[in-house]
Image: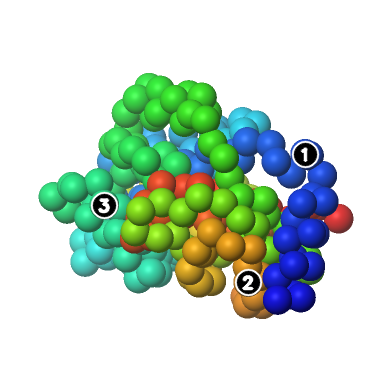
Amino acid sequence: MRKAALLTLLLLLTPAAALARPPVVVELFTAQGCQSCGEANAYVVRLAERPGVLPLTFSVDYWDYLGWEDTFARPEFAERQKAYVARLKLREPYTPQVVVDGRAQVAGRQTQRVEQLVREAARTPVDPPDMQFMSPRRVDVGSGRVPRGGAEVWLVRYDPREQGVAVKSGDNRGETIVHRNVVREIHRLGAWRGRPTAYRLPEAEDPGLATVVIVQGAKGGRILAVAQPKAD
């Protein structure tokens, strides 16, 4: 009880700046072996420069059979996309696909439609729970309303650098695929039930990665809150 009361007090004292609208999260599901993904990748490179938007590039592995194994893909990234496929009632996963704030999806090449979804998300009223990094290994999530079906807390670590990968086989042989904000780790930290809760963060595989914690409806639901540690 004392720990919960102390956590609640700390979150009530969080500076008002921490209560600002979280950035719009734009998730791109892509693959280096996907011949039609280059335009969507290039769009994310530009989008990463825009304030108020957090693009995240998830490389998937289900096109590896075409002749090129994606150098950034992990099975858990494809699993995240499958959760969106079920939640958004799609027939199957595809690339390039963009999911905006966990609320809506569109083909990644339809950049004008992506822009429209980003604008709509930025105008959508939100009431996120307070979030505060208490140390490099702990984040606290405050109280708030939980969507039907529950909510989860996710840790995402990504490489903020722009980087190119020379593809040597498959449909994109001879092409250099440019990436930005490539996700390298994703961890489910636990459930969030609307009460102040502290979550322990695993140590990063690479100290050069950026960190973001996302509170989201369970099983690919809408994104409720986003927080990143302050730069030193």
Picture quadrant of residue 9: bottom right
Q: Is residue 80 visible?
A: yes
In the image, taking residue 139 as reference, residue 135 lies left or right, namely: right
- What secondary structure is marked by label 1? helix
| Tag shown at residue 199 | 2
- Picture residue at 40% right of the left edge, 60% below the top: 150
Marker count (numbered): 3
- What secondary structure is marked by label 2? strand
- Picture residue at 70% right of the left edge, 70% below the top: 4
In the image, is residue 65 above or below residue 28?
below
The reply to whether discs 1 and 2 touch (Cβ–Cβ < 8 Å) is: no
Picture quadrant of residue 15: top right
**Of residues 59 and 26, which is closer to you in this image?**
26
- Picture residue at 77% right of the left edge, 39% below the top: 17
The reply to whether discs 3 and 1 touch (Cβ–Cβ < 8 Å) is: no
Picture quadrant of residue 167: bottom left
Residue that protrudes farthest toward the front in the picture: 1
Q: Which residue is mark 3?
A: 87
Residue 108 coordinates in the image, percent (x, y): 34, 37
Of label 3 and label 2, which has the lower sequence position?
3
Label 3: how many Cα within 10 Å (few below 14, some 14–19, many 20+): some
Quadrant including the C terminus = bottom right
Residue 65 coordinates in the image, percent (x, y): 21, 66
Of label 3 and label 1, which has the lower sequence position?
1
Label 2: how many Cα within 10 Å (few below 14, some 14–19, many 20+): some
Q: Compute the Cα span from label 3 to label 1.
A: 32 Å
Residue 207 coordinates in the image, percent (x, y): 71, 69
Q: Which residue is mark 1?
A: 17
Q: Amino acid at mark 1?
A: Ala
